[in-house]
Amino acid sequence: MHYVSTRAAASAASSSPQQFSDILLGGLAVDGGLFLPSAYPQVTGAELDAWRQLSYADLAFEILKKFATDIPEGDLRALTAKTYTKEVYRNARAGEKASQITPLRVLEEGPNGTKLVLQALSNGPTLAFKDMAMQLLGNLFEYTLAKQDAELNIFGATSGDTGSAAEYAMRGKKGIRVFMLSPHQKMSAFQTAQMFSLQDPNIFNIAIEGVFDDAQDMVKAVSNDLPFKTKQKIGTVNSINWARVVAQVVYYFRGYLSATTSNDQKVSFTVPSGNFGNICAGHIARMMGLPIDKLIAATNENDVLDEFFRTGVYRVRKSAETYHTSSPSMDISKASNFERFIYDLVGRDGERTRALFHKVETQGGFDLSGKPGSDGDEFKLVSKYGFKSGKSTHDDRLDTIRDVADDYGIVIDTHTADGIKVARENLEPGVTMIVLETALAAKFNETILDALGEDAERPQGFENIEDLPQKFVVMKPDVEKMKAYIAANTGL
C-alpha cells in the first residue's frame, strides 16, 4: 500500500511512493497536501460476512492491515489488542456493554422499517469520539519511535475534544511531547479542565487569542516550514494525520455490521461535522465497498459544509464570521480534511486540487456548481458519493436534547443533538440511520443545564475536574513566536 499527496502531480505521485510508516509521524505532505492511498483497498462480501462476529480489536486489525502493510501483522494485531479493551473504553452508559467498544442503541423504529440508531463512540478516557482513533495513534507512535530510537514533538490544534484525547493518549509516552493549541475561553469548562489540569512534563497547552481556525492555520504554517519541522521533529495528531482518519474507518464497519444481518442491507450515517475528519472516514469506508447509502454531514451555525453540499460553493469564513456556539467542537469554518474528498471528487487530479485550495487561501473559497463564472461543475457528481447535509441551531439543540431525554431516557451532548436533529430530517423508508455520538453530555454541562434544568451525570473520576489546578499559557496567533516557544521547550 502506497500513499500519495492530494496536491501531487501525476508524475510526482508515481515517482516517490511512501508507505504507512513513512507518513505516520509527519502529518502534511511536503507539498502541503494530505495523504491518501494511491488506491482504496476493496472489501469483499465474504470478508464482511467473516467480520460480523469479530471483536472490535480484531476488526480493527483486519481493516488496518489493508493500509499499514509495512507493519508486521503480529505487531499490528498486538497494537489493536492493546488499544481496544473494555478497560480503556469503560464509560459505557447503563444498558450498554463496554466490551462492544461502540455499542448501538435503537432510538426509534418506524412501521416502514425505518430505524434511528445511536452509535456510542464516547466511552474512552476523555469521553469523546476522538479517543477511538487517538488511543491507537498513541500506541502506533510509541511503537514506531521505539523502532527508530527517535523523538516526536506533536503540534496540534483543537476546538475541544482532539486536544484532551491526544494528551491523554500521549501523556507519559517515551520520546513524545505534545504542544496543543486551543481557542482561548471558547471551549466548555469541562473541556478546558480536561486539558489544562494535566501536569505531565511532556504536555504543553497554549490558549490562542482567536478562534480554532487561527490555531489550525498556525499548525499548517509550522508544518509547511520544512527546515523547522525537520529540526524540531514536528508531527501532528489532528485529522490531517492519515492514521487518525483510517482508525476512524473501523467504527463505520462496526456500526454497519452490528446494524445489519446481510450485506444486501444498506445503512446511512449522520455525522456531526466541523473539520470533515470523522465523515471523511465514512467516505473512505464507502469507497472500500461498505454498503453505505447516505453520508449526512450535520453542521451547527458554522455551516460551511452544509452550504457546499447544498450549492457546490465552498466559502470559508473569516475569524470574525465564525460563531461561538453551544456545540463548540464544530465551531470551524475551514474544514482541513475536506481536501481529501475534493481530491476524489475531481478525479484524483492533484494539480487541480492544488489550484482549488490555493484559491481557498487567496480568495476564500471555490465554486464547483457549474454556473457561469464558477470554477467547475463537479458538484453534479456529489450524489454519486452519497453525501447530503443539514444544519442545526442552538434552539434546535435544546429542543433535541429535551426530546431525546423525554422519549428515550438518555441525555446526549450538544453535537450529538445536532446529528439527531439532522438525521430525523433525512430518514428514509427501510433504511437504518446511524447517528455517530460525539461526546458524553457531561462535557457540555452548561447547555444540558439550560435544556433540562439539571446537571448531566458524570462518570466516576470526573466529579470535580474544573476545580483542579490548571497549567497553560496564553499567546497571540503569531507563528514566529510559536516556533520560538516550541524550540525553547524541546531543547533541539
Image: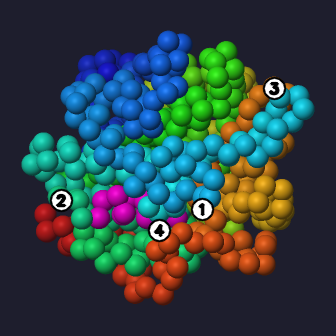
The boundaries of the magenta stretch are 160-171
Who is closer to the viewer here, 278 or 408? 408
Residue 21: x %, y % from top left: 25, 35
> Which residue type does callout 2 highlight?
Lys
In which quadrant of the rendered image does the N terminus lie? top left
In primary-sequence order, the first of circles 3 and 2 is 2
Q: Are marks 4 and 2 in contact (CB under 8 Å)?
A: no
* Residue on which disc 3 sits: 430
Q: Mark 4 or 2, which is nearer the eye?
A: 2
Q: Is there CB contact under 8 Å for labels 1 and 3?
A: no
Asked which secondary structure carries label 1, the reply is loop
In the picture of the structure, the residue carrying the numbered disc 4 is 182
Q: Earlier in the sequence, mark 4 or mark 2?
A: 2
The residues tagged by marks 1 and 3 sit, at their Cα atoms, a distance apart of 29 Å
Dot placed on the residue nearer the N-terminal end, 1 or 3: 3
Position of residue 301 measured from the top left corner of the image (x, y, whole percent)? 73, 58
Q: Residue at x 35, y 47 (%)?
A: 83
Query: Would you say residue 300 sits in the magenta stretch?
Result: no
Residue under pointer 1: 440
| Vertical comparison of 279 with 383: above or below | below
In the depicted view, which residue is nearer to us: 476 or 252?
252
Measure the alpha-carbon separation of dots 4 and 2.
24 Å
SS state under label 2 = loop
Dividing the image into 4 quarters, which one contains the C terminus?
bottom left
SS of the residue at dot 4? strand
Q: Would you say the residues marked 1 and 4 are in contact, meaning their CB atoms lie under 8 Å apart?
A: no
- Farthest residue to the right: give it: 111
The residue singled out by tag 2 in the image is 174
